[in-house]
Amino acid sequence: MLIFAISGKGGTGRSVTSTNIVYRHALQGNDVCYLDFDFGSPTAGAIFSVGAVARGTRRHGLHEYLRGDCAEPHQVDVWSESDREGLRTRPPEAGRLVLLPGSEGGGELSGGNEDMVRRCVQLFSRLNEEFDLCMVDVSAGRSYTAELVLNATARLPSIPFRWLVFHRWTRQHIIAADGLVRGDDGLLDAGARLGHDPEALRDRIRFVRTAVLEPDAAELVGLRDEQRAWLFACDQELRELAGRHKVGRTAMLGKIPLDPILQWREQIISDEDVLASKIANAETASAFDELAKKIVDDTAWEGL
Amino acid sequence: MLVMGEVHTGLLQSSGEIPESACRDVLHLMSGETVRLSRRPMIYAVSPDLLTGVDCRLPSASRSRIRGVGTVVSHSSITGGRVVQGSSYARVERAETDRRLAWSHYLARPGVIEVLGKAKSSDLGDGFIGDPQPNGLDLGSISARFMDVVQSSPLLDRRAPFKVARTKVRWVAQPGDPAIRFTLNADQTRTIRIAHSGDFTPAVVDLCEDLALHDWLLTTLLLIVERARIGGRAGPEVVAKLAPAVDHLLHLWMPAARVDEALVPYWHGLEDRMRFTAQWERLVRRIRDQLTLNDAAMLRSARHP
Ligand SMILES: Nc1ncnc2c1ncn2[C@@H]1O[C@H](COP(=O)(O)OP(=O)(O)OP(=O)(O)O)[C@@H](O)[C@H]1O
Ligand SMILES: [Mg+2]
């Protein structure tokens, strides 16, 4: 299974959320890999605390691979190469957790060619032989990278794939998420042009809300009544807006609460962060855990 | 001087084993020439040999710049309708002159790479077996492509029963007193060194492919048993995790079945040291014991619900 992580806007929490989902999926016993296709700013190494590839790799990153400069991309085994002690011990029930970093200083992919599409197809099909799940961080907005993976998946009809569109719970983000999917030259448009059936493609797209602060959250108990009333009204408005933009409950796969430690640092939330040091909220970890199950749960992906 | 080769092995991307006719069709797509097929002791289908032209730097342990020009021979095969291999090799020989000749010259000697200039056979062999330099002769990516062609065949449903990485075996054969060494590296790569008396024959390639096949089977069975976490979860769950091994792998173990009689002693020599078959049989017993235990438990709970 291939999962593509994208967002309408930058800085939504796409990388932090998708890396945490992959980590939880590995803990659930699956062999997983994470492909950093955000060529402009490859940050996945930093999130997994692999210092050596914190800003991408110097040798055989995905960028070089797609341009044909190396035969095989560099693979990092997170369980053995992470600098975080908590990530360096692989629990007995966990599957493999492998990162394919981008190239350090690689830059955005600009218009590629047929060869690049062919190499992308080859990469996806080889990884699909080896891993239960491959998560691909496609970067924000419309990009050549998004077209590349749409093109590659159109040529791999028997490899299942899904898209996750990440957005924050604000007006601008809701509108941008909808635009990215349904707007001019959005995913559905571009997908149809590249050979996907638009209806089938639409059924393979779900939304994920990030850094959500519910108006009745414990963090907000100190608020004045006027503030709370305003928040509830605002939340209600956003729900209506989301519904109109087809980003509402039915198309949503899940939501991740706002977590103080993620606001301060882009990182993986381990059970130790929740249970031992208690710096992270249990709700955040369980939201990641839940999403890690839902991405492969077919009942959550039935036609809308 | 020497022969170098690389074999990649992996699980065919289909839900079940495919019949003889499908093996033929999948491999036929590659070249249109006839697929060779043998039925005993197991169905084995192999594509015709195809050539890839190379003009590149050759591996060298001393990192010398050695240029080689010629062709690499490759083919793809399917064993038991279930396991795919992509295999490439080239005989490295000294060129008559130090300049590059017309392609017709190299095409007349398929599977030979001529070394332009000086080179020591041991330096080339050590370089190939050790850490290969980037931008040099890359038999691995040729073999990987020969596997890809099979794996991406539209005739396969791509719903393989489990996920498993391909293994890579790099081998070097040189004339000398008969000897063989097999080394397992940390990642999915292995190396084989063979010294053979007399001239090199393609039977050596068959031997390496057979070793690669069995090393893959053993590696994969170990992985399935590890993933099953025997003792770490409920019996029926363990059995469910072990089932793909029973359905798809256990019947494929047949060491040296396709190996030329003259080379069978190499297999025996390795067996004495590495005990491949002993380890395989122990794993098989372990799996069977789990199935038996689980059957007994099911029977008991059926009698005393
Ligand atoms: N659940 C959360 N709670 C609080 N902060 C969060 C949460 N998720 C992400 N963040 C923070 O939001 C910021 C942006 O996150 P991230 O880098 O993952 O976004 P992105 O969409 O990948 O950005 P870019 O488009 O620049 O790659 C980071 O500082 C991150 O730690
Ligand atoms: Mg990011």
Image: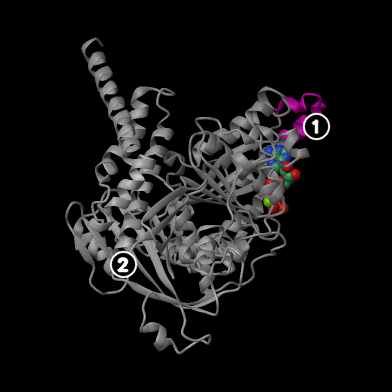
Q: Which image quadrant for residue B117?
A: bottom right
Q: Quadrant of ligand 1?
A: top right
The answer to whether the residues at label 2 and label 1 have Cβ atoms under 8 Å apart is no
Q: Position of residue A243 (x, y in %)?
A: 58, 45
- Secondary structure mostly seen in magenta is helix
Neighbor class of circle 2 (other Cα within 10 Å; few <14, some 14-19, many 20+) is: few
The three-letter amino acid code for the residue at tag 1 is Gln
Pointer 2 residue: B201
Residue B171 at x, y = what percent? Answer: 43, 59
Residue nearest the observer in this picture, B211 or A206: B211
* Residue B159 in picture, x, y percent from top left: 35, 50
Q: Is residue A211 above or below residue A280?
A: below
Q: Is residue B297 left or right of residue B228?
A: left
- Residue A149 magenta-highlighted: no
Per the image, label 2 sits on a secondary structure element best described as loop
Quadrant in the picture for residue B6: bottom left
- Whether residue A169 is visible to the viewer of this picture, yes or no, is no
Asked if the beta carbon under badge 1 is closer than 8 A to the nearest atom of ligand 1, the reply is no
Q: Quadrant of the C terminus of chain B?
A: top left
Examine the structure image and report whether residue A221 is included in the region drawn in magenta: yes
Highlighted magenta segment, given as a residue range: A216-232
Q: Is residue A209 left or right of residue B209?
A: right
Q: Nearer the viewer, residue B81 or A19?
A: B81
Q: Chain of mark 2?
A: B
Mark carried by residue A227: 1
